């Protein structure tokens, strides 16, 4: 699939570069079911996109293992040319090592390939939420029919993680959360760390910004 010339203003335009055809087609199938996403590009490797104008893409999903030119090299080559582009790197390699390398190269997010089918949609929303989605006028019929974006995003959180999330969004200090829930502060910190990881966020500020952005779009 080449890069389409027309991109809907109501959707996030997404490109995928992965040399495993079955996996690539599975990701394309998954994302095209979401009315907020428009998969504009599906490529086997860098050779297919090197001469393309990616200006109209919002998100590029890249596998690290692509043969001669790996995903990290692609990030380094594309980010200076298309600074607006959000790049999500996928890999089955050691996360502790390659996540740091991907982020240092300019990637916006790293997702373990084994978790891609469960985490990618949320990763796209989290990566795009504060800047890209906020700038768009997305009509309600393009969003989730029965539930808002925020509810979709947090559906995999445990009951305790949701409790901590609710208190955090209200600005309640951890000591007070600990007292109200009858859990020690260290455990509260653990729950917060887990929920931030599941939402692909780095801290409270990103969490609150994303919440406000998505809830505003749901009203």
Image (cartoon, rainbow, N blue to C red):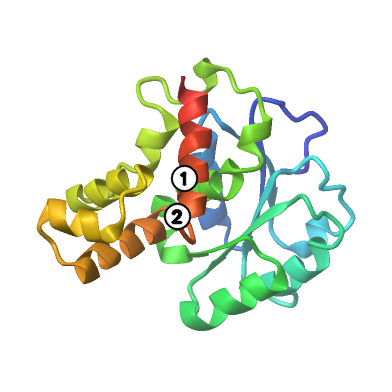
42 to 19, vertically: above or below:
above
Q: Position of residue 197 (x, y in %)?
A: 40, 61
Disc marking residue 99: none
The residue lying toward the viewer, choosing from 31 and 145, is 145
Indicate the quadrant where residue 135 lies. top right
Indicate the quadrant where residue 115 lies. bottom left
Q: What whole-number distance in Å separates the C-alpha atoms at marks 1 and 2? A: 6 Å
Where is mark 2, residue-wise? 204
Query: What is the crowding at mark 1: few (fewer than 14 residues within 10 Å), some, or many (at least 20)?
Result: some
Q: Position of residue 200 (x, y in %)?
A: 46, 57
CB of mark 1 within 8 Å of CB of mark 2? Answer: yes
36 to 41, vertically: above or below:
above
Residue at figure coordinates x 31%, y 49% from the top left: 172
94 to 25, vertically: above or below:
below
Query: What is the crowding at mark 2: few (fewer than 14 residues within 10 Å), some, or many (at least 20)?
Result: some
* Residue 70 in view, yes or no: no
Mark 1 secondary-structure assignment:
helix
In the rendered structure, the answer to whether residue 190 lies left or right of residue 10 reads: left
* Residue 205 in view, yes or no: yes
In the rendered structure, the answer to whether residue 48 lies left or right of residue 24 reads: right
Indicate the quadrant where residue 198 lies. bottom left
| Residue furthest out toward the left | 182
Residue at figure coordinates x 47%, y 64% from the top left: 113
In the rendered structure, the answer to whether residue 181 lies left or right of residue 192 reads: left
Q: Position of residue 156 (x, y in %)?
A: 29, 48
155 to 200, vertically: above or below:
above
Disc marking residue 208: 1
**Quadrant showing the N terminus:** top right
């Amino acid at each position: 699939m080449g890069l389409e010339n027309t991109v809907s203003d109501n959707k996030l335009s997404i490109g995928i570069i992965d040399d495993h055809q079955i996996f690539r087609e599975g990701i394309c199938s998954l994302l095209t079911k979401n009315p907020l996403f428009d998969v504009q590009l599906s490529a086997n490797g860098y050779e297919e996109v090197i001469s393309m104008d990616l200006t109209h893409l919002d998100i590029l999903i890249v596998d690290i293992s692509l043969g001669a030119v790996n995903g990290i090299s692609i990030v380094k080559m594309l980010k200076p040319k298309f600074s607006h582009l959000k790049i999500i790197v996928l890999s089955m390699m050691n996360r502790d090592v390659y996540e740091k390398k991907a982020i240092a190269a300019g990637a916006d997010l790293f997702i373990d390939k084994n978790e891609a089918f469960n985490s990618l949609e949320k990763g796209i929303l989290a990566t795009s939420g504060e800047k890209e989605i906020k700038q768009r006028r997305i009509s309600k019929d393009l969003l989730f029919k029965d539930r808002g974006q925020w509810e979709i995003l947090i559906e995999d959180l445990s009951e305790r993680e949701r409790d901590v999330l609710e208190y955090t969004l209200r600005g309640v200090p951890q000591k007070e959360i600990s007292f109200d829930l009858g859990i020690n502060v260290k455990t509260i910190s653990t729950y917060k760390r887990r929920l931030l990881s599941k939402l692909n966020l780095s801290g409270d500020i990103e969490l609150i910004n994303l919440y406000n952005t998505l809830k505003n779009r749901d009203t």
